[in-house]
Image: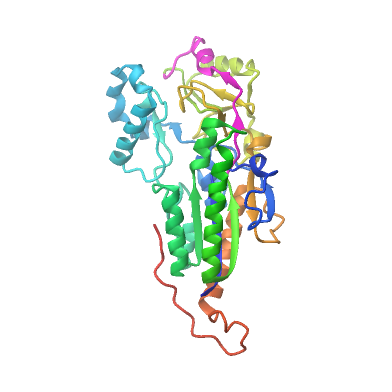
Amino acid sequence: MKALLPLFIFIDACGWELIKETPFARTVAPHRQRLESVFGYSSACIPSILSGAWPVEHRNWCYFVYDPGHSPFKSLRPLRWLPEALTSRRIFRRWLSRWVKARLGFRGYFDLYNIPFRHISLFDFTEKKSPLRCGGMNRGPNIFDFLKLHDIPYHVSDPASGERENLRQARAAIESEAVDFVFVYWPELDGLLHRVGHPAPEIAPKLGGYEEGINELVAAAGRHYDEVRLYVFSDHGMANCDELLDLQQQIRALPVRMPQDYAVVYDSTLARFWFFNDTARTQITQCLRGIPQGRILPDDELARLGALFPDRYFGELIFLVKEGVLIVPSHMGQRPIRAMHGYHPADPQSAAVLLTNQREIPAEVQAIPHLYQLMVRDAQVAAGRNRTAPDAGERTSSQPGPPPRKPALAVVR
Ligand SMILES: [Zn+2]
């Protein structure tokens, strides 16, 4: 028996609007609050949670950037001759993404999405390492670097394993009492919500499954640790997409060309532009100003969102659509999907959640990067208590406890 386990369970896309009225996990985590998300996709939100930093600080923001000098995709250029009927198919893209990821040695999440092969050698991919591992940030440390530095044994899910397997491994780590910190990552709700939106009949069973998993881990932790600090949280919510915007068609109609005059990445809710002459800048800016479904984000707003990059690495101009609008086709997808995130963090469906059994959450915990402070604080408290605490049953004794236990081998995957 150990003294304390901080148990952090991350459910991707479990938004505040999705669960605020529901009894989801209320018995084990009765204290619940809304958290502001981070501007960007999971590629920005997850690194922000894991590091406590904002995109401008850790530089994990959007996946693809215009950077022909560093593009690892030059070998894919011959694929531009393949018929689009084949290369735009998801099954082909998924297979090719796996092959490219292995060949280029990328350690994080990788998907070629719908980037056209005729332009692919102009782009670099910004998440070559996994933020869920030590040394995984583009800049600065993450929670796993912190745990390693302080010799705190921990368990973290491997996203390559399925959710069932992740549950089994987390439970095994808890039952071994070898860890002072557990971080579980469940990504499947995100994919489900993209497909079906909400409300939808598929959502409640999925949440029910998560609730069972949470209960199972809490029960296991309760048998092996005197105190369990449970935090169930997310990175963003999800908005149904009720309006489609063919932005590419409008930009292509202008008398400027890619890549001679400009470059662009069409994410599903953002378009990020780089300009190579004033004509392109003027023409495209004017065109975007006339599109009622979105707006160009001014620098001061990007700065407030922690996403104004002085070197304009992720784009010189950032166009963002309104919540519920989907840019399609985009470089993220050829066809519409039911729901999306990556809207303005102030939009209602963007909000993330924090559900906990802890009565006192510091008032400054308002946005997802602040979860990092909770992780650091509890990991330190757990490491201290688990090393010095006498075994259960002796805890009220005034006798000095047994000598500090060296934690067993870290369960790190
Ligand atoms: Zn998603």
Residue 53 on image: x %, y %:
57, 49
Number of callouts in the render? 0
Task: Examine the structure image and report whether residue 349 is included in the region drawn in magenta.
Answer: no
Task: Examine the structure image and report whether residue 255 is included in the region drawn in magenta.
Answer: yes
Magenta-highlighted residues: 235-259
Residue 122 on image: x %, y %:
38, 27
Give the position of the C terminus as an image quadrant.
Answer: bottom left
Q: For the point 67% across and 45% down, which residue is it?
A: 22
Identify which residue, 203 or 178, lies in the foreground: 203
Establish if 250 lies above or below 332. above
Dividing the picture into quadrants, the one containing residue 148 is: bottom left
The answer to whether residue 55 of the structure is visible from this angle is no
Please, which residue is most extreme toward the bottom here?
399
Identify which residue, 202 or 227, lies in the foreground: 202
Establish if 271 lies above or below 256. below
Q: For the point 46% across and 17% down, which residue is it?
A: 261
Establish if 243 lies above or below 392. above
Identify which residue, 407 or 172, lies in the foreground: 172
Dividing the picture into quadrants, the one containing residue 399 is: bottom right
Side of 377 where 154 appears, left or right: left
Q: For the point 61% across and 48% down, which residue is it?
A: 368
Residue 385 on image: x %, y %:
56, 74
Dividing the picture into quadrants, the one containing residue 98 is: top left
The answer to whether residue 285 of the structure is visible from this angle is yes
Residue 225 on image: x %, y %:
54, 70
Identify which residue, 226 or 256, lies in the foreground: 226
